[in-house]
Image: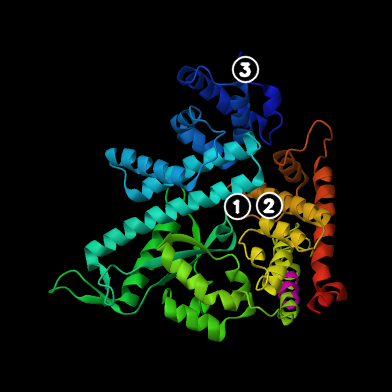
Amino acid sequence: MINLNDHMANKTASPAQAIELIQSLLPEIINSNPNISQVSLDALILVLGNCPFLARWTRRFPEKVIDLLKEDLWQTSSLEDYQKRLQLEVSNLKQKKIGIEESLIHFKYKEIFRICYRDIGLKTPFEIIAKEISLLAQSIVQFSLKEIRKQLNEEWGKLIEIKTGKEMPYTIMAMGKLGGYELNFSSDIDLICFYASDQGIAQKDIHAPSYTAHQYFTKLTQELNQLLSKKQEGGFLYRVDLELRPEGKSGPLVNSIDAMETYYESFGAPWEKQAMIRANYLAGSESLFKKFIKRIHPFVYPKMADFSFLKQLKEMKEKIHQSLSQSNAQGFHVKLGQGGIREIEFFVQSFQLLFGGRLPDLQGTQTLSALSSMVKHQFISSEEAKKLKQAYIFLRTLENRLQQVEEQQVHRLPEDLEELNKLAIRMGYDFHKNEIISKELLNDLEKHRQFVGQRFASLFDTTFGGLAS
C-alpha cells in the first residue's frame, strides 16, 4: 500500500514543500507506474524536500519526473548511457521544433534530477555520484563539440591538415575535478583546448575566404564556450573556465600541440605542473590527447623529486588563507578553508608530484585512488588513508548539499542557525534526536578538519622532508 509517508517528509529540510508536490504528483505516478515501490516514493520525497531548485523544476515539468520514475534509477549510468539518452532527447525534442541549445538544457536537468534522486534518495556512494556528474558533463561537451564543428564546417569549410590531407584533430582536455571524474553539482568545468598543427587551412570553396588553423580553432572554441555557458530561461549548462591554458587570460584561447609542449617545457610553473596531474581526455581527438600527455610526462613527473615545490605549495596555501581572512564573508569555506577539501587534494598531489616519476601507480587523476597507492608505498598508513578518505567524502558531500539547494557555487557554511539545521538535515542527521542538530554536524566537521589540517601540516615538517633522503 503506497502512502505519502509524512514521516519521510519530516526528514527533509522543507517538509511542506515535499508533501505538497507529492500530493500533486501521486495520482499520475500511480496511474503510469502502478507497481512503484514505497522505497522509490520515499526517495522522491527526500529529493523534493531537500532541493528547492529541483522542486521548482518538478512543478514546471511533472511529466519528466513521472517518466523518470518508470526507469531503473538504481542503475549506474556509463558514458554510453548518457550519449544514447542525449541523442534520444535531442531527436524527440527536434520533432517538437525545439532547438539544440534548449534540448541540451532539458537533458541536463532531467539527468541532474536522476543523479540527485540516486544521491539523496537512494544513498548511492559519493564516488559513483561524482563520476556520474562528470560523465554527464562529458556527454554534453562531446555532443556540443560535434554540433559546433559541423556548423563551422558549413560556414567556413573543413579545416584540412596539409601534411595528411585529412580533417585536422582538435582536443578538449578536462582539468581539475572534471579531469578526475570528481565533479560536484555546481562546478565550473576547467578546459584546455588544442589542435594538431598550424599547417592547415579551411576554405568552403575557391571563391570563399580561407582561414588558418588558429583562426578556425579559436572560432570553434569561442562558439563552444558560448553554447556551454549561455544562460537561458530554463537554466544553463556549465560555467566554463578556460584560464588554465598557457599564459591564462593573456594567452591564446587555443594552441597547437607543439606550442603547448614548448610552453610547458620552457615556462611551465609549479602550479601548472600540479594542475596537469588531473588532465584527462574529454572530447575531440583522444589520440591527440594521448600524444600531448606523452610529450609532457617528463614535465609533470620528473624522475628526480624537487622538494622546493613544497615551499611554493606552502606559500600558495598561505595566500589562500590570507585572502579568506580578508573577505567579509563568514562561515567555514568547505573548499579552501583550513582542513578543507583543497588541503586533502594538495596533500595527495604533493606525493604524486614528488614520487610519481619513479612510482607510476601514483600518477592517477583521482584523489581517492591515489590515497590507496600512497598506502601501498607506505607514505601513509591504511588508517590515515581511511580517515582522509572519510574526511574527503564528508567534505565533498557537504559541498554538494550546499549546492543542491539552488544550483549555485556555494562553499561556505551558513551562519544562520535555521539554515545550518537545514544543512544538517540534508546531510542526513536526525532532526528528532536533537533540535539543534547543527551541533552534531559542526562537531563531525571539526574532527575531520583537525585530522586533515594535521596531515597537511606534516608536508612541511622534518618527517616529510626526510623522505627526500
Looking at marks 1 and 2 on the same chain, the residue that comes earlier in the sequence is marked by: 1
Q: Is residue 197 above or below residue 157?
A: below
- Residue 73 lies, in percent from the top left, at 54, 33
| 290 falls in the magenta region | no
Q: CA distance from mark 1 to mark 2?
A: 8 Å
| Displayed quadrant of residue 310 | bottom right
Determine which residue is flagged by label 2: 396
Give, as a three-letter code, the residue at label 2: Arg
| 316 falls in the magenta region | yes
Q: How is the image coloured?
A: rainbow
- The residue under the point 43% across, 62% down is 286
From the viewer's side, name the closer residue of 405 and 146.
146
Looking at marks 3 and 2 on the same chain, the residue that comes earlier in the sequence is marked by: 3
Determine which residue is flagged by label 3: 3
The reply to whether callout 1 and callout 2 are in contact (CB within 8 Å) is yes
Determine whether the residue tagged by mark 1 lies in a helix, strand or loop: loop
**Side of 172 where 120 appears, left or right:** right
- The residue under the point 36% across, 64% down is 223
Determine which residue is flagged by label 1: 184
Magenta stretch, main secondary structure class: helix
From the viewer's side, name the closer residue of 22 and 199.
199
Q: Residue furthest left?
A: 207
Q: Decide: few, some or many residues near mark 3? Use Cα within 10 Å; few <14, some 14-19, many ≥20.
A: few
Looking at marks 1 and 3 on the same chain, the residue that comes earlier in the sequence is marked by: 3
Give, as a three-letter code, the residue at label 1: Asn
- The residue under the point 59% across, 26% down is 40
- Residue 358 lies, in percent from the top left, at 67, 73
- The residue under the point 70% across, 40% down is 426
- Residue 182 lies, in percent from the top left, at 60, 54
What are the residue bounds of the magenta stretch? 314-321
- Any part of residue 400 in sight: yes
| Displayed quadrant of residue 89 | top left
